[in-house]
Image (cartoon, rainbow, N blue to C red):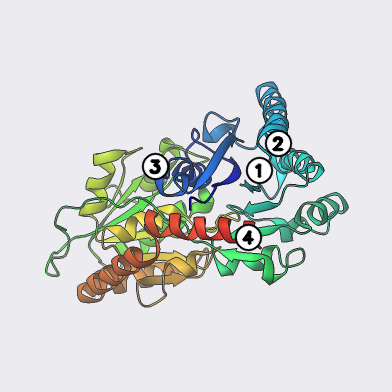
Amino acid sequence: MILKKKNILFLLHLPPPVHGSSMVGKFIKDSKYINEQVNGDYLNLLASNNVSETGKISLNKVMGFVNVWFALFFKLLKKKPALCYFAITATGAAFFRDVLLISLLKIFRVKCMYHMHNKGVSKYQNSKIYNSCYKFIFKNAEVILLSKHLYKDIKKYVPLTKIHICPNGIPEIELDEKKNDDVDKKTVKILFLSNLIKSKGVFILVEACKLLKERGIGFKCNFIGGEGDITAEILKNKVDSLNLNNEINYLGKKYGDDKTAFLNEADLFVFPTYYSNECFPLVLLEAMQFNLPIISTFEGGIADIVEDGVTGILVSQNDVVSLAEKLEYLINNAEVRVDMGLKGKAKFDKEFTLEVFEKKMLSILLNSIDT
């Protein structure tokens, strides 16, 4: 007996721009495993062409919304999906766009599964407008969270019985033999990989590097990523003012084999973020693939990625002194550094591959339809 595939309508984000939510949207849309077992229909919610346009209203975005609304209307009319997967935005103009789209879904009485790639609900829940909207959209809906640590953000509106935990996964990279597992090497290479944004902890790491140099610790620290609210010139001036030119290099954006080479050569990955919307940074999963121990912060779902004291170390946000101390510890203890990196790679293989993500996601979607 051949079972009829379920119709699922996916409202998701697709690159460009490239960020965590759009990458996960692409993984789902391109998933042979998922699309072999459901009849997937896809609508792209993103109207931005690059990260700098995110969060800004423009005529093109308004027209894009109108096109999505009509496309959604006709898909609901024609396809009659059993479930709608919705990569919902928690706040801002995009949230109110989503509310209008969800209103249409409710008119057609389509069951909704929201996938939260961001947070901010708890911050705005005391606003009368937001509170009313949250009550409306979350009523009878099920929600996919990236980490159990993110539940507190929507606790007011969604019972635990409606929550599904599905950590993100990324494609596996075929790696050459690691070059950085030599415990006797003299200069440890630290890597920061993200856009140059203050709240990602760029200056926190720079200041920690200053303390390391003052203590006579030898190291090299590479910053890789595009310019954000910190430009290359601003970073250079900061590095110059602290006399860290021999220790810190900004290398701009790197992609493909170039990025892989720097990950492969690094000894230690540092991501001291205090970004308020940080949920489940994919860059940490990338680092784990390369046997890199991670130093990061207690933000969003990071504590589900980095096991403090096992696969890396978590520090308080904006704590330059603590970050410098943990950096010094791992620089001076190569055996610990290597052991953490290997345990991180084992955790990645078990929990964060794309295959694991696809199987978990499909199971959640199908079980939701059947209940």
Q: For mark 2, what is the residue?
A: 76
Q: Quadrant of residue 321?
A: bottom left
Q: Closer to the N terminus: mark 2 or mark 3?
A: 2
The amino acid type found where label 2 is placed reads Leu
Spatial distance from mark 4 to mark 1, Cα to Cα?
Answer: 13 Å
Question: Where is residue 339 drawn, in percent x and y?
Answer: 24, 74
**Residue at 86% from the left image edge and 53% from the top image edge:** 132
Q: Closer to the N terminus: mark 3 or mark 1?
A: 1
Side (left or right) of 139 relative to 325: right
Residue 81, numbered circle: 1
The amino acid type found where label 1 is placed reads Pro
For the residues carrying marks 3 and 1, which lies nearer the camera in this image?
A: 1
Question: Where is residue 1 drawn, in percent x and y?
Answer: 48, 53
Spatial distance from mark 3 to mark 1, Cα to Cα?
Answer: 40 Å
The amino acid type found where label 4 is placed reads Asp
Question: Where is residue 267 drawn, in percent x and y?
Answer: 24, 61
For the residues carrying marks 2 and 3, which lies nearer the camera in this image?
A: 2
**Residue at 65% from the left image edge and 36% from the top image edge:** 79
The amino acid type found where label 3 is placed reads Gly
Secondary structure under tag 1 reads loop
Q: Closer to the N terminus: mark 1 or mark 2?
A: 2
**Residue at 54% from the left image edge and 42% from the top image edge:** 39
Secondary structure under tag 3 reads loop
Spatial distance from mark 3 to mark 4, Cα to Cα?
Answer: 43 Å
| Mark 3 surroundings within 10 Å by alpha-carbon count, few (fewer than 14), some (14 through 19), many (20 or more) | some
Labels 1 and 2 touching (C-beta < 8 A):
yes
| Mark 4 surroundings within 10 Å by alpha-carbon count, few (fewer than 14), some (14 through 19), many (20 or more) | few
Q: For mark 4, what is the residue?
A: 370
**Residue at 25% from the left image edge and 48% from the top image edge:** 262
Q: Nearer the viewer, residue 126 or 102?
A: 102
